[in-house]
Amino acid sequence: MTGEAPSSAAGPAATVLAIESSCDETAVAVLRGRESLLSAVVASQIEAHRPFGGVVPELASRQHSAATPGLLAAALEKAGVDVADVDVFAATAGPGLASSLLVGNTTAKALALACGKPFLAINHLEGHLLSPFFGDSEGVQPNVALVVSGGHTMLVDVAGVGSYELMGRSRDDAAGEAFDKVAKMLGLPYPGGPLIDQLAVEGDPKAYDFPRSMMKKPGFEFSFSGLKTSVRYLTETFDQEKRDEWLPDVCASFQQAVVDVLVGKTLRAAKAAGRKLVTVSGGVGCNRCLREEMQRACDRAGLDLRIAEPALSTDNAAMIAYVAHEHHLLGRSSSLDSDVDPNLPLTNQANRA
Ligand code: KG4
Ligand code: ZN
């Protein structure tokens, strides 16, 4: 279902317009070449979903539908690019919420059709995976990648663009999901990850000894559901009237348990794969404790570390445009009759539908 890009496609400085709508952020970005991000706009739906304590799929797709035309116009205007001058239209094809994916995906296909330009279906995970290289003129270098988002926790051996070997992933909750579920349990609003990060600053990470699941087991799988249950059992015994006193310690101790496992397994994976470079991407990559501890551990082990900057860690369209540009350079394009896939796996040449 893929083919060579039409011969009209521009060379290395192609202009890519990408739409990301896999979950609760609608985002559009215009990228020229590998390095020039001409515009990147995001409409967050967090406020719409907050009363429900999580993302409501139908609400999400309706919000994407309402936000997309305005964001497209804003992104093109900000970029100073006419839609007719876009060389490639791209959109996330999965994984994500089907009805949300369809909004961005169908819009990008319609634009590609109307403008007679190629379309590229992009794997959201590949967007996160390659985001630490955004803006680097040398492009993607071999690395062991920790992708930690609200939906996924995985370790991937990256040999280059499109060459990915999954080393391990979470058997149950993703790290971000664990942050959000523990936050909800503690009475914090959605999404709880950034709030736990903030509260943990005031707390003692050694106050409670939460389990580091799978830490001692060989292999690179994760499990965070037991940790979540431990937090629940512990806090159920606490005096809720004194919540302000114990909350920062619980947040710091929980966060430390997650970070210890993520850092420990990532370092072990880098050693096993023989890679000298470690990357971290995805929303949980914004976590200050994770960033600091991963840096310290990599310094100790003599490894280089690249973490996507915070604006590129949470969902955004610049990372989708970046991956689309890399695949365009390799002469790939996707068929307009390709489907979205809520469970799209990250496999080699992930965009090849
Ligand atoms: O990558 P992302 O924006 O969306 C997905 O693809 O899932 O990640 C969102 C996740 C949420 O679970 C959110 O709570 C978490 O990233 N997150 C954080 C922080 N910032 C975002 N978790 C811990 N600490 C943070 N500072
Ligand atoms: Zn994401």
Image (spheres, rainbow, N blue to C red):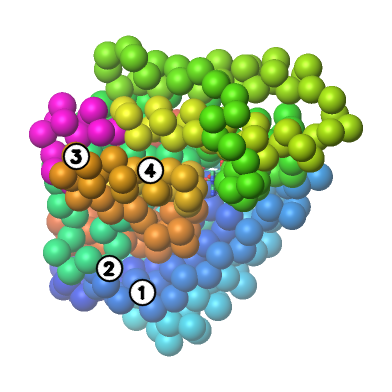
Of the two numbered discs 4 and 1 on the same chain, state the one appearing first in sequence.
Answer: 1
- Name the residue tied to disc 3: 301
Q: Dot 2, how many residues are within 10 Å of its Cα: few (below 14), some (14-19), or many (20+)?
A: some
Disc 4 beta carbon < 8 A from ligand 1?
Answer: no
Position of residue 246 relative to residue 92, above or below, is: above
Which element is circle 1 on? Answer: strand
The image quadrant where one finds the C terminus is top left
Question: Which residue appears farthest toward the right when viewing the image?
Answer: 241
Amino acid beneath label 2 = Gly
Q: Dot 1, how many residues are within 10 Å of its Cα: few (below 14), some (14-19), or many (20+)?
A: some
- Give yes or no for residue 273 being in the magenta stretch: yes
Of the two numbered discs 2 and 1 on the same chain, state the one appearing first in sequence.
Answer: 1
Rendering coords of residue 105 (x, y %): 47, 52
The span from disc 2 to disc 4 (Cα, nearest Å) is: 24 Å
Question: Which residue appears farthest toward the bottom when viewing the image?
Answer: 80
- Name the residue tied to disc 1: 37
Disc 2 beta carbon < 8 A from ligand 1?
Answer: no
What secondary structure characterizes most of the magenta part? helix
Contact, mark 2 vs mark 1 (Cβ under 8 Å): yes
Question: In the image, which is nearer the foreground, mark 2 or mark 4?
Answer: 4
- Name the residue tied to disc 4: 293
The image quadrant where one finds the N terminus is top left
Residue 138 appears in view: yes
- Name the residue tied to disc 2: 135
